[in-house]
Image: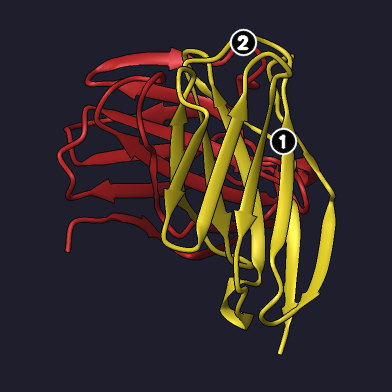
Chain colours: A red, B yellow
């Protein structure tokens, strides 16, 4: 089945220790998104790739970086995680950028920062 | 802000009853989407309604959109325990912006 896969499902890291979350998709979609969702809050868009074009949200901290080496994979790098970065990180894809499109989400990675 | 605001924040009903959730937003949109999120999981797309549509159905789901009032509603008929989840509206004005969600509990 075509899908969006996130690994790992649970990640524990130490304060300040870099961490990488991964996302892969078999949908062959042009656009891949990363969202941060804190407990009982709305998912918040961090950035997205349209093919190789990277689009950062204005309020995304510099601590968050992303890489998309090919159509199928996208990575979220948190360079120096703080306690406030503990959250669920959701990867999503869509066939077209932003408007007029359904987004397909992975199951998420729950990040804990000790 | 374009962000949608869902109402109520939490809703608890009995199996078989209908559940209605509302969403209000502030700016013009291309479409409005509803998503479901089971606890600790990713979001699942339920339905998309375009700005020129007023009502849309999908199985037990009925969505309405009133662009003059900048509001939408999601009705789940004959609810089941498996419908227990958080429901988010997301406004699409070039990018998807999610509201804070309604937490629905359906009691058996």
Identify which residue is drawn at 58% across, 58% down. Answer: B37
Which chain hosts label 1? B
Depth check: give the residue in front, B84 or B76.
B76
Please indicate whether residue B64 sits to the left or right of residue B102 in the image: left
Q: Are marks 2 and 1 in contact (CB under 8 Å)?
A: no
Identify which residue is drawn at 18% across, 56% down. Answer: A2
Q: Residue B23 carries which label?
A: 1
Depth check: give the residue in front, B31 or A61.
B31
Q: Which mark is residue A33?
A: none
- Rendered view: B90 above or below B22: above
Instruction: Provide the secondary structure element on which disc 1 rests.
Output: strand
Q: Where is residue A5? Give x, y as percent.
A: 32, 57
Q: Name the residue under label 2.
A: A58
State the image quarter where residue B2 is shown. Answer: top right
Count residues near mark 2 (Cα–Cα under 10 Å), then give few for <14, some for 14-19, many for 20+: few
- Return the residue found at the far front: B54
């Amino acid at each position: 089945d075509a899908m969006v896969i996130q690994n790992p499902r649970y990640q524990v890291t130490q304060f300040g220790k870099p961490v990488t979350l991964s996302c892969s998709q078999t949908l062959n979609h042009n656009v891949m998104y990363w969202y941060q969702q804190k407990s009982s809050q709305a998912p918040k868009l961090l950035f997205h790739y349209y093919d190789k074009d990277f689009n950062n949200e204005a309020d995304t901290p510099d601590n968050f970086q992303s890489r998309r080496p090919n159509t199928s994979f996208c990575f979220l790098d948190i360079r120096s995680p703080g306690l406030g970065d503990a959250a669920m990180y959701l990867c999503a894809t869509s066939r077209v950028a932003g408007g007029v499109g359904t987004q397909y989400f992975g199951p998420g990675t729950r990040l804990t920062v000790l | 802000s374009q962000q949608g605001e869902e109402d109520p924040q939490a809703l608890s009903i009995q199996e078989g009853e209908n559940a209605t959730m509302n969403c209000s937003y502030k700016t013009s949109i291309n479409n409005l989407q509803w998503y479901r999120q089971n606890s600790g999981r990713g979001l699942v797309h339920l339905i998309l309604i375009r700005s020129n549509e007023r009502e849309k159905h999908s199985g037990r789901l009925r969505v309405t959109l009133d662009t003059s009032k900048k509001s939408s509603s999601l009705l789940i008929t004959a609810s089941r325990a498996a419908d227990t989840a958080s429901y988010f509206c997301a406004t699409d004005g070039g990018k998807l912006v999610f509201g804070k969600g309604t937490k629905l509990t359906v009691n058996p």
